[in-house]
Image (cartoon, helix red, strand yellow):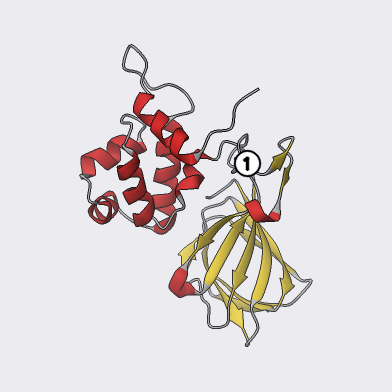
Amino acid sequence: MKANLTKEARASQLNEAKGLDGSLLPGTADEIGEKIRLRRKVRGLSLREVATMAQISIGQLSQVERGRSAPSLRALQQICKALNMPMGWLFDDGNGDNAGFDNGIVIRTNQWRVLDFGPKRMIKHLLTEDTCRDLQMMRVIVHPEGDSDVYVTKGDVECGTVIEGTLGLQIDDNEMSVAVGETFTIEGHRNVRFWCIGKKKVVVIWVSTPAIY
């Protein structure tokens, strides 16, 4: 049975992540580096921008992302702060206290991971675990005056249903509204924008294939 470790204990293990031959052990710095890289891409930041905010070198950050270097706890804290990313995300392996799973199936509401998009007045709750790579389900909340701005979809197909409020949705040059109970489907690699219509927040269950976060 795998013992549960504190976040600090798991982080300290990074400094012992290399084997006798200098190679990275599985499930340590390589996986953490991949999570950091994906998060940086989500935030739309370059290596230089994150390294500057984290006060580390570009080379060090690149090595961390590729799993070639085991960063110190302080460096991890700085990187996570730069990415607006709770450090606990890095150590969520589906088995410890961070995961909140029942037999790897149920994720409790208090264990949802949260992406806060700040000025866009939008948050996303991630409802599927990292190991589910082929599909990702999210609970998206857009507050009044919230707007995603135009972006290119990353998934092959995305779809959703509105469970509260009214969603404004633009796909390429087509603009529409989506009311409670209505659904939408977006083919991959399209120019998309969505926003909250009216003075009440909009809540959407959003699904992407494959996972994008």
User: Splitting the image into 4 quarters, where does residue 202 fall?
Assistant: bottom right
Q: How many marks?
A: 1
Residue appearing at x 45%, y 48% in the figure: 87
Q: Residue furthest right?
A: 181
Q: Position of residue 21 (x, y in %)?
A: 32, 12
- Compare residues 53 and 97 and report the one nearer the observer: 97
Dot 1 surroundings within 10 Å: few (below 14), some, or many (20 or more)? few
Q: Residue at x 35, y 40 (%)?
A: 73
Location of the N terminus by quadrant is top right
Q: Position of residue 186 (x, y in %)?
A: 62, 61
User: Could you tell me if residue 75 is visible in this image?
Assistant: yes
Residue underneath mark 1: 134
Image-based side of 177 in relation to 56, left or right: right
Q: Which residue of the protein is positioned furthest toward the bottom in this rendering?
A: 199
* Residue 18 position by quadrant: top left
Residue positioned most to the top: 20
Q: Position of residue 26 (x, y in %)?
A: 47, 23
Position of 8 compared to 213: left or right?
A: left
Q: What residue appears at the point 24 percent right and 39 percent down from the top-left corner? A: 60
The amino acid pointed to by label 1 is: Asp
